Image (spheres, rainbow, N blue to C red):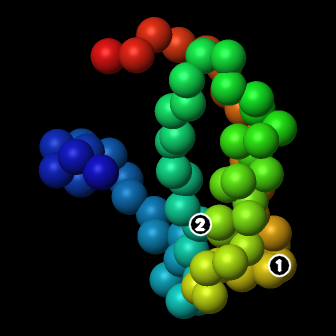
Amino acid sequence: MPNSRLLDTEVVNWSHHSRASRLVLPVRVAYGASMNIVRSALLEAAGDHPDVLKKPAPQVWFQGYGDDF
C-alpha cells in the first residue's frame, strides 16, 4: 500500500484476528499459453507449499489478455 493512502484513506486490517491471510499474486503468461496448463501448474505449486491452507483452497482467476510492458 502506498504511504500516501495511509494518510488520506481508512486502512482496515482484515487479518488481525488470525495468523492466516490472503495473498493475491498477479501472474503474466505468454499469449497462446494454455490457460488449463497454467492454472494446473499454479494450483499444484500452491498445493505443494506447506504454508498454503487446504481450506479455503487456493484459486486461480484468468482476468484477460493485455499488452506486456
In the rendered image, residue 51, in percent from the top left (x then y), is placed at: 59, 85
Crowding around mark 2 (Cα neighbors within 10 Å: few <14, some 14 to 19, many 20+) is few
Position of 47 with respect to 11 (left or right) is right
Q: Residue furthest top?
A: 67
Residue found at x 67% / y 55%: 42
Does 45 appear above or below 59?
Answer: below
- Element under label 2? loop
For the C terminus, the quadrant is: top left
Residue found at x 52% / y 40%: 27
Does 66 appear above or below 37?
Answer: above
Q: 7 or 54: which is nearer to us?
A: 54
Q: Which amino acid does label 2 sit on?
A: Arg
Residue under label 1, please give it.
55
- Element under label 1? loop
In the rendered image, residue 8, in percent from the top left (x then y), is placed at: 24, 43
Residue found at x 67% / y 17%: 32
In the rendered image, residue 54, in percent from the top left (x then y), is placed at: 80, 80
Contact between labelled residues 2 and 1, with CB atoms less than 8 Å apart: no
Can residue 35 be seen by looking at this rendering? yes
Position of 9 with respect to 31 (left or right) is left
Q: What residue type is labelled 1?
A: Lys
- Cα distance, mark 1 to mark 2? 12 Å
Residue under label 2, please give it.
22
Residue found at x 59% / y 66%: 22
Q: Earlier in the sequence, mark 1 or mark 2?
A: 2
Does 21 appear above or below 30?
Answer: below
